[in-house]
Amino acid sequence: HGRAKVLYALARLLQKHTRLTAVLETLDNGKPIRESRDIDIPLAIRHFYHHAGWAQLQEQEFSNYKPIGVAAQIVPWNFPLLMLAWKIAPAMAMGNTIVFKSAEQTPITAMFFAHLCEQAGVPSGVVNIVNGAGNVGASLASHKGVDKVAFTGSTAVGRSIRQSTAGQGKKLTLELGGKSAFVVFEDADLDAAVEGLVDSIWFNQGEVCCAGSRLLVQAKVVDKLHAKIKKRIQKLRLGLPLDKSTDLGSLVSQTQYQRVDQMVQQGLQHGGELFQAYDGQSDGNYYPPSLITEIDASHPLAQEEIFGPVLVSMTFRTQTEAVALANNSRYGLAASVWSENINRAMDVAPKLKAGVIWINCHNQFDASCGFGGVRESGFGREGGKEGLFEYLKPKSLTSTKKLKPVTIKQQTSSNETIDRTLKFYIGGKQVRPDGGHSIATYKADGSLASLVGSGNRKDIRNAVSAA
């Protein structure tokens, strides 16, 4: 239970230094001190407590698995300490060693955590923390001594990591970008939905991968909901992150401010109506909460991840249309459904193509629940029991007997068996291969078993369409 004691000690040390850690996180990132103090730090502590329990249960629950080895972990700048806890806690609980790289914009809390590791008694070499720009992360991910790569960040960087690690036999977890749908039906509690939007897209200045940045509203209530949203935006307080009354702090950097502003301005050239209660302040990287309406699903701002406090809104008429619009994205990280009719919500939720679905809430996390995406939002899970398997591999299996090599026997006479080529089975019926080609299959003793059709692109298309 040595690892459990160390993880528990880390949780207790974070609790003892909650105020200091929250201030460091806000100084590092620019998020409001209330969010650091009340959300980020408590959830990070929860992850270490939770995984301390799993470390005690490892021999009982994962008896057929062993640690994967050296885990390279690369995190972004939006939740520096929380992402550290998401990565380090499960890896350490399962007995792995770690090389952790924080974002170059936000290294302070990771460096403070290194001091806590010394106080908690983490053995030398178990947790190793490096800093640097993107090239350092790329070198770390492709290093031959690394057995597992866990990355949270943009889809573009995730794609490059997957390419650089291809063929190396490394286990890979990618938690990438998102354009999460926030679906509001006409029977929803609109006041609750507005507060849900505040906690969704304007939480952490919108710098959240699973932010509900695509608002889909049933047409009957769109005007009423937009009016409530605009009224709520006017009451949001934008200002100094260390002020406890601030609702939105500053974006992480001048580069991020310019990126968000440029994306919005370029997107509005394709149409759309922008509402902002007040102007931004580029000198402090304060970007105002924004609502963009009068756009359709093909609009660039409805398809691209802005990663800022910008909400885009579209309408739908029917439940079927709502599902189609929500799924009309290359991302699939999260979504939420808002309705007072639980039957409707439970019918819609499984139809949405996303890794995490919330009902009448958004951005709700817990260490016991797995989190991750589908499509271009990545793959793999972090948190919960399923997240632990990302840092384990099966124990070696040994064969009970040696297999003799099989020699393929040539068919000597066409009279020995009936010359019959097996067809495909697509759409409930047998179908001949489109290309007209066949391949031979053999029995265990090497003799010819049969001929089967060889598929091509058209056969694949037909089968997928039928499915």
Image (cartoon, grey):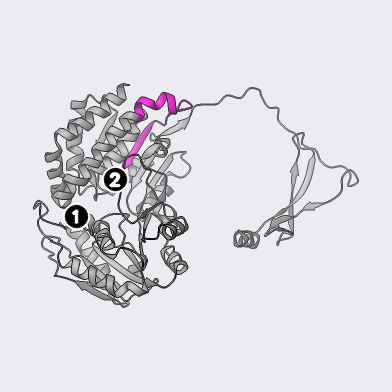
Q: Quadrant of residue 97?
A: top left
Q: Residue at x 48, y 42 (%)?
A: 167
Q: Decide which of 249, 356 is in the foreground and name it.
A: 356
Q: Can residue 63 be seen?
A: yes
Q: Residue at x 43, y 49 (%)?
A: 163
Q: Quadrant of residue 229?
A: bottom left
Question: Which region of the structure is painted magenta?
Answer: 54-77
Q: Which residue is mark 2?
A: 75
Q: Amino acid at mark 1?
A: Val
Disc 1 residue crowd, few under 14, some 14–19, many 20+, Cα 10 Å: many
Location of the N terminus by quadrant is: top left
The C terminus, quarter of image: bottom right
Q: Decide if residue 395 is on the left or right side of residue 81.
A: right
x and y, in percent, of residue 117 in the image: 21, 29
When the figure is inspected, residue 248 is found, relative to residue 174, above or below; the finding is below
Q: Residue 444 in the image: x percent, y percent? A: 74, 35
Q: Is residue 234 left or right of residue 297?
A: left
Q: Earlier in the sequence, mark 1 or mark 2?
A: 2
SS under mark 2: loop
Kind of element beneath mark 1 = loop
Q: Is residue 299 visible?
A: no
Bin the neighbour count of mark 2 within 10 Å (Cα to Cα): few under 14, some 14-19, many 20 and up: many
Closer to the camera, 415 or 135?
415
* Mark 2 residue type: Val
Indicate the position of residue 433 as horizontal and vertical percent values. Answer: 72, 59
Q: CA distance from mark 1 to mark 2?
A: 14 Å
Disc marking residue 115: none
Q: Which mark is residue 252?
A: 1
User: Which of 194 and 39 lies nearest the eye of the viewer?
Assistant: 194
Q: Is residue 256 magenta?
A: no
